[in-house]
């Protein structure tokens, strides 16, 4: 029995050092060296302060900012610890009422905008944390943001265009706009 314990213990210690120490250190070191921005959380800074991450949406309600997709996490919006969809189907009365309320809030914030409201501004994503909106959703908000900030609409549209991310590998997904990065850039704009 004593002959079996020593090799088993040696194997346990050796594998623990390799898988619990050497491998994590090597992967962390490689990530920090090759992809430091992503390895540190893809953080976005505004005015020298960390404003958030490019990977998780934030609640913007000020009419002078672009608004992101609604969050399905409750009670705190965009809570990464509570990630998950609402699981409400399109015929669910609660979802229909929430969409009506969101459309009404968008119309109230920009009463002159008669364009159809893009669906991603009134429905949450599957994770409830999506930091992006469609290009159509960003462009829908340009008149409101430009009016509130006293900027030319074409300047705000140019900001949206500058923050439009293309399809992954030119094929996967749709063009999208990261709301936090767009708002951080917007806050650096001269007028307000």
Image: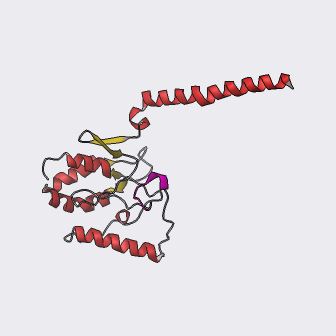
Image check: 124 left or right of 179? right
Image check: 32 left or right of 25? left
Magenta region, residue range: 75-82
Q: Position of residue 127 (x, y in %)?
A: 47, 56
Q: Residue at x 17, y 47 (%)?
A: 189
Vertical relation: 92 (above or below) 86: below
Q: Residue at x 41, y 37 (%)?
A: 38
Residue 116 is drawn in which quadrant? bottom left
Say which quadrant the N terminus sits in: top right
Instruction: State whether residue 43 appears in this view.
Output: yes
Q: Is residue 80 magenta?
A: yes
Residue with the most extreme right position: 1
Q: How many marks?
A: 0
Which of the colour schemes (rainbow, by chain, secondary structure, one colour) is used? secondary structure
Q: Is residue 41 magenta?
A: no
Q: Position of residue 62 (x, y in %)?
A: 24, 59
Q: Residue at x 80, y 26 (%)?
A: 5
Q: Residue at x 84, y 22 (%)?
A: 3
- Main SS category, magenta section: loop
Q: Position of residue 15 (x, y in %)?
A: 67, 27
Instruction: State whether residue 115 appears in this view.
Output: no
Residue with the most extreme front position: 2
Q: Position of residue 101 (x, y in %)?
A: 34, 73
In the image shown, does 170 or 88 lie closer to the viewer? 88
Image check: 149 left or right of 106? left
């Amino acid at each position: 029995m004593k002959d079996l314990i020593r090799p088993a213990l040696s194997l346990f210690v050796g594998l623990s050092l390799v898988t619990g120490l050497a491998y994590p250190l090597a992967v962390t070191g490689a990530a920090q060296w090759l992809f430091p921005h992503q390895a540190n959380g893809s953080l976005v800074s505004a005015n020298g302060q960390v404003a958030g991450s490019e990977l998780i949406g934030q609640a913007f309600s000020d009419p002078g900012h672009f608004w992101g997709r609604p969050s399905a996490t409750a009670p705190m919006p965009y809570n990464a610890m509570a990630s998950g969809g609402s699981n409400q189907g399109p015929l669910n009365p609660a979802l229909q009422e929430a969409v009506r309320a969101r459309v009404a809030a968008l119309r109230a914030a920009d009463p002159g905008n008669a364009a159809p409201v893009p669906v991603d501004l009134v429905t949450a994503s599957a994770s409830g944390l999506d930091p992006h909106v469609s290009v159509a959703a960003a462009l829908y908000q340009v008149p409101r943001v430009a009016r509130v900030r006293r900027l030319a609409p074409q300047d705000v549209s140019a900001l949206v265009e500058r923050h439009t991310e293309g399809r992954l590998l030119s094929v996967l997904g749709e063009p999208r706009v990261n709301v936090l990065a767009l708002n951080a850039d917007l806050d650096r704009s001269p007028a307000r």
